[in-house]
Structures are given as C-alpha cells and as structure tokens.
Image (cartoon, rainbow, N blue to C red):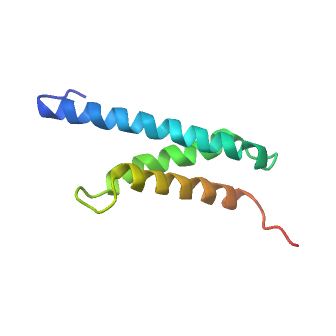
Amino acid sequence: MLFMGDELDSCELDYDTMRALMAGVRTAADRLKSRLPPHLDVNDVVSAGYLALVKARAYWEEGSEDSFEVYATNRASAAMVAALRATTPPQSY
C-alpha cells in the first residue's frame, strides 16, 4: 500500500504506538504464563491481545475521553482474559 503526504506521518505514529502496545501485550502474557493451563500456549493469549489491539484501532473514536493507549490496553487485557476463560473449564471448589 502506498501512502502520500500526511498519511505517512500519521501511519508512522500509529505504527510506533502499536509496536509499543504489542510489546505490552507480550509482557502481560508472559506474566500469565506460569498460571496458564497446560493445554493453552502463551502464543494463543498473545494472539487474542494482538487482535484486540487491531480492533481497538478500528473502534476508537478520536477525541474520546480516554487516550488510544488506555483504550487499547484495556481491550487487549480483556481479550486475553476472555481467551483464557473460553478455553479453560470452570473450576469447582
């Protein structure tokens, strides 16, 4: 895809922001690694977080009260927890 003019500048900013957020997703998943059930790979959780970041970029509205970073971080965290819950049977106590 070719970018022209200001589109390139905003694309680079988004790229840098997304790379930083992706690193945060990986860090959060690595923290969860020790608590993951044996049938779940940490990369499954990371994938859910990355997908949530992409979706967050599509749904975030410029000028909302939360910054994109806060919005995307919350969406990614929730997606990783949802991925864990979806693949792990409920525990009976």
Q: Nearer the viewer, residue 84 or 28?
A: 28
**Which picture quadrant has residue 31?**
top right
> In the picture provided, is 55 more to the left or to the right than 9?
right
Residue depicted at 20% across the width and 31% down the height: 9
Residue depicted at 72% across the width and 41% down the height: 41
Above or below: residue 54 compared with residue 15 = below
Q: Where is residue 30 in the image (x, y as percent from the top left)?
A: 66, 39
Above or below: residue 25 compared with residue 8 = below
Q: Position of residue 42 (x, y in %)?
A: 68, 41
Q: Which of 64 and 1 is in front in this view?
A: 64
Q: In which quarter of the image is the N terminus?
A: top left
Residue depicted at 17% across the width and 34% down the height: 7
Q: Position of residue 19 (x, y in %)?
A: 43, 33
Q: In which quarter of the image is the C terminus?
A: bottom right
* Residue farthest along the bottom direction in this orientation: 93
Residue depicted at 47% across the width and 56% down the height: 75
Above or below: residue 32 compared with residue 43 = below
* Residue farthest along the right direction in this orientation: 93
Q: Where is residue 36 in the image (x, y as percent from the top left)?
A: 76, 48
> In the picture provided, is 91 more to the left or to the right than 55?
right
Number of numbered callouts drawn = 0
